[in-house]
């Protein structure tokens, strides 16, 4: 099976909506792009408040995260699309997404460490004086840095998620909250035919569907066991600082500080693959964040805490997403975005929506729009079955 040929034509699926399994950021972003392309869309979500889109800090950081290979290419391609994507959401919703082209600074203890960073070539090298200029009050440990002016942030928790929900509603997307997808039902063991759900009220239902997008994030392997997706817990907190006390994101090792327009400082994040789906904050995790704040920006350690929360990143063996055709004909994958879901939402939504429409229309004659060769290559690099059996079982680095 190649990466783009596993779908169904609309002649087979009639006017049945495309089902989106998962109402997090990725699910909503795909739903929105499909609706903009004229598809009927229905989003099924168990509990949207658990979605990583409400948990993440909203960094747009392919360079600051030190990505490499195809994941860096995907991240850079998404970063380039984000302004136009945000404009679409803002136009459809009438709400701001809180995009800030603020740049990100990565600090290092030595210039050697700075120069060895995987994405150093994309950044502006900073000395200690340069660091103090960019980040007044930065801790004394840091002697060198990289400024990535092209990276930034978006206020995912307070603005983007709401704007995207509203944009979907305005574009006619239907929502069913409190609907847990229990099973993917195949026609004679082959193509997707229906999904079985359990509603919050306790009743089960079967929904006929020949096209669906699995966007269940950290919970993906619960629905489809062969997907190599595991939860990687992250704990976070926020502080209220003075407005403009920090103008750029400060991305340290193990802790990062993301300043919102109004002075709220979002602080992330622990990385706890061994925690599995264990809920709640831990003293160790919160102490780790506090120590990170003290090391990065000592004055912020006394700013008042506003909120503390946790969530689950969808981790994969190579830390990159699973995109495109899934193991069941008619099922598409948009999951496994690990640390970069907010960054990758734009390109994921565009590629997956274009792919579904392309495959659906391809039964009807020549296609004049959709996926170009570069998009196909990108999708090919993120096939779900790219891992050997041994690699699938490998655990994520902490
Ligand atoms: N994107 C940063 C994190 O997942 O913690």
Image: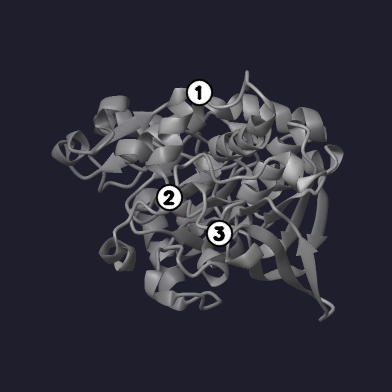
* Residues at discs 2 and 3 in contact (Cβ within 8 Å): no
User: Residue visible at 44% across and 42% down?
Assistant: 2
Q: How is the image coloured?
A: one colour
Dot label at residue 256: 2
Residue 334, given in percent of the width and then of the height, sits at 55, 49
Q: Which residue is mark 1?
A: 372
Task: Decide: is 46 above or below 338.
Answer: below
User: Residue visible at 60% across and 26% down?
Assistant: 370
Task: Decide: is 83 above or below 325.
Answer: above
Query: In terms of secondary structure, where does tag 2 sit?
Result: strand
Crowding near the residue tagged with mark 3, few <14, some 14–19, many ≥20 C-alpha atoms within 10 Å: many
Task: Decide: is 111 above or below 366.
Answer: below
Going by the picture, which residue comes out furthest to the front? 188
**Drawn side of residue 28 relative to residue 237, left or right:** right
Q: Nearer the viewer, residue 386 or 276?
A: 386
Q: Earlier in the sequence, mark 2 or mark 3?
A: 3
Q: Earlier in the sequence, mark 1 or mark 3?
A: 3
Place residue 163 in its image quadrant.
top right
Crowding near the residue tagged with mark 2, few <14, some 14–19, many ≥20 C-alpha atoms within 10 Å: many
Residue 365, given in percent of the width and then of the height, sits at 66, 24
Question: Can residue 390 be seen by looking at this rendering?
Answer: yes
Q: Ligand 1: does it lie within 8 Å of the C-beta at label 2?
A: yes
Name the mark nearer the viewer: 1 or 3. Answer: 1
Q: Which residue is mark 3?
A: 217
Going by the picture, which residue comes out furthest to the left? 112
User: Residue visible at 41% across and 45% down?
Assistant: 382
Residue 303, given in percent of the width and then of the height, sits at 54, 55
Residue 50, given in percent of the width and then of the height, sits at 64, 64
How far is mark 1 from mark 3, CA to CA?
A: 27 Å
């Amino acid at each position: 099976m190649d990466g783009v040929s596993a779908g169904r034509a609309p002649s087979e699926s009639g006017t049945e909506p495309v089902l989106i399994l998962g109402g997090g950021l990725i699910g909503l972003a795909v739903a929105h792009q499909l609706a903009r392309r004229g598809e009927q869309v229905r989003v099924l979500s168990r509990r949207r408040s658990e979605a990583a889109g409400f948990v993440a800090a909203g960094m747009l950081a392919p360079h600051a995260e030190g990505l490499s290979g195809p994941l860096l290419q995907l991240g850079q391609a998404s970063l380039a699309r984000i302004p136009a994507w945000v404009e679409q959401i803002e136009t459809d919703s009438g709400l701001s997404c809180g995009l800030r082209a603020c740049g990100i600074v990565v600090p290092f203890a030595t210039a050697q460490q700075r120069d060895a960073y995987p994405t150093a070539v994309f950044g502006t090298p900073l000395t200690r004086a340069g660091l103090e200029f960019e980040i007044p009050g930065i801790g004394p440990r840091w002697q060198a840095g990289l400024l990535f002016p092209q990276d930034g942030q978006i206020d995912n928790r307070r603005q983007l998620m709401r704007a995207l929900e509203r944009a979907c509603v305005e574009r006619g997307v239907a929502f069913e909250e409190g609907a847990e997808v229990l099973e993917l039902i195949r026609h004679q063991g082959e193509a997707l035919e229906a999904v079985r759900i359990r509603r919050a009220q306790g009743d089960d239902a079967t929904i006929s569907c020949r096209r669906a997008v699995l966007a269940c994030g950290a919970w993906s392997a619960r629905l489809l066991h062969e997907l190599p997706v595991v939860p990687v817990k992250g704990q976070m907190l926020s502080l209220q600082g003075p407005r403009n006390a920090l103008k750029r994101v400060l991305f340290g090792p193990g802790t990062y500080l993301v300043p919102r327009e109004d002075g709220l400082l979002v602080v992330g994040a622990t990385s706890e693959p061994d925690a599995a789906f264990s809920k709640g904050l831990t003293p160790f995790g919160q102490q780790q964040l506090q120590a990170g704040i003290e090391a990065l920006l000592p004055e912020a350690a006394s700013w008042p805490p506003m909120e503390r929360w946790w969530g689950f990143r969808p981790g994969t063996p190579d830390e990159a997403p699973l995109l495109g055709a899934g193991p069941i004909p008619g099922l598409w994958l948009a999951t496994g975005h690990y640390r970069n879901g907010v960054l990758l939402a734009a390109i994921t939504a565009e590629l997956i929506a274009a792919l579904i429409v392309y495959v659906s229309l391809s039964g009807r004659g020549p296609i004049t729009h959709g996926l170009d060769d570069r998009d196909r290559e990108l999708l090919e690099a993120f096939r779900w079955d790219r891992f050997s059996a041994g690699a699938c079982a490998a655990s994520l680095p902490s």
